[in-house]
Amino acid sequence: MKLEFTKLPAKEMLKRSEEFKNLMLRRRTVRSFSKESVDFRIIENAILTAGSAPNGANKQPWKFVVVSNLEIKRKIREEAEKLEKEFYEKTAPEEWLEDLKPLGTGASKPFLEDAPYLIVVFAEKYRIVNGKKEKNYFVKESVGIATGFLVAALHNAGLAVLTYTPSPMDFLSKILSRPENEKPFILLATGYPKEDTEVPDITKKSLEEILITVY
Ligand code: IYR
């Protein structure tokens, strides 16, 4: 089929690129959420956006499990906090703890209960078709891009997002009854920030630091 593509005027392109950059630069990772509810249709639209991501051979190797049930959120929090306690009190190397200091993180994870939605992104390692394993391609790359789309879509809709990666994450497969071919990739908490939420005073690298031009 024919590609639908509208070439925009150069000025309009530049303006849009600035506006999108400015929108994305206003995104902050939030670790403290209000319990206020959010229209589920916003989450559905964000997941459809994520599902549009480019991916290996269009196999779309992802599943998005959205949890709003308080009991399930509590279970996830309980298991995650066990892991985090172990991490912060025993296994974390000193250097890692030092790097986390400016972020003010710790073993307590109330956002897992407070945020109206937890979106657990699963990577489909392979598919079972007619009882046979079928390959997926570039799964991590594909699911990484889809997650980026998801974060951008939620932010664009006016929601705060936290990307959270407890380690190891297999407890999420158990709690959410996901099959063996799906591997937990990342958990996003989303909703409104708690009132007067503070964020660390951090900066992003400059263009000079991240852009290398090859003429
Ligand atoms: N998973 C822990 C530690 C942690 C690790 C990194 I790398 C971060 O960017 C933030 C936190 C926690 O969530 O507290």
Image: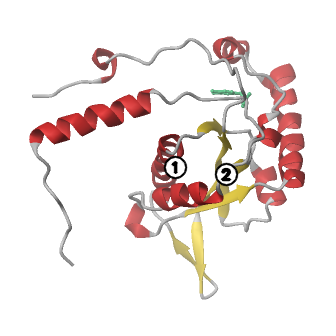
Whole-angstrom CA distance, mark 2 to mark 1, is 10 Å
Q: Position of residue 204 (x, y in %)?
A: 44, 18
Residue that label 1 marks = 150
- Badge 2 marks a residue whose secondary structure is strand
| Mark drawn on residue 119 | 2
Q: Are marks 2 and 1 in contact (CB under 8 Å)?
A: yes
Is residue 143 depicted above or below 2 in this figure?
above
| Label 1 CB less than 8 angstroms from ligand 1 | no
Q: Give the vertical position of 86 relative to 48 (above or below).
A: above
* Mark 1 residue element: helix
- Count the marks: 2
Q: Residues within 10 Å of mark 2 (few under 14, many from 20)?
A: many
Locate the N terminus by quadrant.
bottom left
Q: Position of residue 161 (x, y in %)?
A: 61, 38
The vertical placement of 167 against 211, above or below, is below
Residue at x 59%, y 29% (from the top left corner): 29
Q: Nearer the viewer, residue 7 or 141?
A: 7
Residue 152 or residue 9, whichever sits in front: 9
Callout 1, which amino acid?
Leu
Question: Would you say 151 lies left or right of 2 here?
Answer: right
Residue at mark 2: C-beta within 8 A of ligand 1 = no
Q: Amino acid at mark 2?
A: Ile
Residue 151: x and y in percent read 52, 43
